[in-house]
Amino acid sequence: MTVTIRRVLCVLPLLLVAVVAVRQRDVLTEGLGLVTTARWPWLLAAAGLTCLTWPAAACTRQGAVLERLPGRRLVATQFAAGAANHLLPTGLGASAVNLRFMTVCGLSTARSSAALALYLLAESVGRVGLLAALLVAFPDALSFGSPLPDEAPVGPFLAAGAVLVLAIGALAAVRRVRTVVAGFLRTALGEARSVHARPARALALWGGALAFPALQAGVLVLVARAFGLAVPSAHLAVAYLAATVAVALVPTPGGIGSVEAALVVALVAAGGTAAVATAVVVVFRLLTVWLPLLPGALTLAALLRMRVI
C-alpha cells in the first residue's frame, strides 16, 4: 500500500501540470507568441535572474532552523516546492513540501512547523518592508487616480471582519485548541530566539527574505526592458511588490489569474500602456511560472521517489 501511494504521489504532479496547462492553454499560446517580439538578451538575463530565486528561497529556509540542512537537496526542494505551490492553493504546496523535507532531515514536526511559520513571517515582512521603503523613496511610483467610489460599500467588509472575530473567539473558547496553540507559540518563539542568537542564521533568514522579492522584481524589470516599456525600474519594482502584496490573500494556485490581473493594473498605474503591460506580464509569468513548472514537477516526483521528501 505504501509503495502504491508513493507511486501515485510521484505521478500526481505531472497530471496536475497537464490539467493546469490545458486550462490555461490560451495564456500559454499568447505568451509563446509574444516571446518572439521581445529582445532576447533581456529575456536571457531575466531567465538567469529567475534561476537565482530558488537559492534565495533556500537561504531563507536554512536561516529559519539551527541545524545545517543538505545544501543541494535544499535548493532542489525549493525548485520542487515552487511547482507544488503553483498546483495547490497559495502557500499550501510549498509549505507541505518543505515541512516534509525538514521532517526527513530529522527535525520534529513541532520544530518544522515553527521554522515554517518563521519563514512565512520573514518572507511577508521582507516583501512588505521592501515595498514600504520603495514607496517612501518613490512616492509617485503609482498613480491609480481614484479607484474607490465616493460611497465605498464597507458593510460586507465589516460583516466579514465580524465573522472572523467570532470564529477566532469560538476556537479560543475550546480548551484543547488553546493548549495546542499555546504549545506551538512557545516552540515558535523558542526557535526564533535561537535562530536570532546565531548571526549567520539571522543574516540568511532576513537576507534571503529580502533577496527573493528583489530578484522577482528584477525579473519583471528585465522583461519590461525586453519589450521597451518606458517606465523607471524603481517604479516597476514598486508595481510588482504592490501587486503581489495585494493578491497575497487570494487562495488561487500560484496566484494564477489574480497575479496577472494585479500586475497589469499596477504596470498601467506605473505609467505603461495596457497593451505593452499585458505583454510584459504574460512573458514574466511564462518565465517564472510556466517554463519551470514541468521540470519542477519532475524534480518533485524524483525527490518523492528518492524519499528526500
Image (cartoon, rainbow, N blue to C red):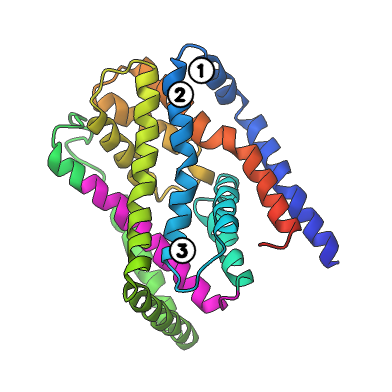
Name the foreground residue: 87 vs 113: 113
State yes or no: residue 290 in magenta: no
Q: Mark 3 or 1, which is nearer the eye?
A: 3
The N terminus, quarter of image: bottom right
Cα gap from disc 1 to disc 2, whole angstroms: 9 Å
Q: Which residue is mark 1?
A: 35
Q: Which residue is mark 3?
A: 62
Please state which amino acid type lies under the numbered disc 1: Val
Q: Position of residue 196 (x, y in %)?
A: 32, 72
Q: Residue at x 53, y 21 (%)?
A: 31
Q: Quadrant of residue 232?
A: top left
Give the residues in magenta: 106-132
- Does any portion of residue 154 appear in the rendered image? no
Q: Which residue is mark 2?
A: 43
Q: Quadrant of residue 41?
A: top left
Q: Position of residue 60 (x, y in %)?
A: 42, 58
Name the foreground residue: 115 vs 242: 115
- Does any portion of residue 33 appear in the rendered image? yes
Q: Is residue 10 left or right of residue 112?
A: right
